[in-house]
Amino acid sequence: MAYMQRLAWARANPQDMMVAWSYTLARRFDSAAMRAAALTAAAGLALIAAFRHRRQPAIAYAAGIVGSLLASPYLHLYDFMLLFPAAWLLLRVAPAAWVLPPLLACYLFLLLSTHGGPGRGGCSSASASGSARSRARLLAGWPLTRRPT
């Protein structure tokens, strides 16, 4: 009897039963039709971008990565780390100096994000800034310098 009541509650409250639902694009829409349209548009735009840049596989792969994240019904925080290979692939093909600051800002936001919200827990700001500088230098193609021991 208790199991049937739980099933009835789950059927009546599907939003509460979603796992890793809060980070997705689909979460932003209330109706099922709008949700399906948004996910289809995200996947379609990724396919169009990949097709338009089919002679540059790095851009096609980056478009596929971003499109699959946008169209995914479930995401965890660590899934957003796939954006870094996508950015790396894109920067290898079309490097632009103006792209690096927004990428670093997004990286810091992801680095400091937890399930409790951005900036709660995780690592100290000193280690975050040092790690961000190292990754920024790697993204830009600059060599990392080592301190003498």
Image (cartoon, rainbow, N blue to C red):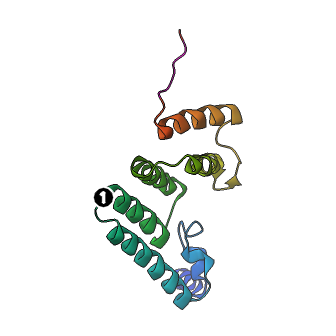
Percent position of residue 103, x then y:
57, 50
Residue pushed farthest top? 149
Q: Can residue 73 be seen by looking at this rendering? A: no
Using the image, determine if residue 59 lies above or below residue 145: below
- Residue occupying the point 65% across, 38% down: 123
Q: To which residue does mark 1 refer?
A: 57
Give residue 107's position: percent from left, percent from top. Answer: 58, 48
126 above or below 89? above
The residue lying toward the viewer, choosing from 81 and 19, is 81
x then y, percent, for residue 92: 40, 47
Q: Is residue 46 above or below residue 33?
A: above
The residue positioned 41% from the left and 64% from the top of the image is 63
Say whether residue 112 is left or right of residue 7.
right
Asked if residue 61 is positioned above or below residue 95 in the image, the reply reads below
Local packing at callout 1 (Cα closer than 10 Å; few below 14, some 14-19, many 20+) is some
Find the magenta span and give its range: 143-147
**Which quarter of the rendered picture does the N terminus lie within?**
bottom right
Please tell me whether residue 139 belongs to the stretch shown in magenta: no
Snapshot quadrant of residue 58 = bottom left
- Residue at image x 59%, y 34%? 133
Horizontal side of 78 relative to 28 (left or right) equals: left
Q: Main secondary structure of the magenta part?
A: loop
Give whichever of 105, 113 is nearer the camera.
105
Residue 31, given in percent of the width and then of the height, sits at: 59, 89
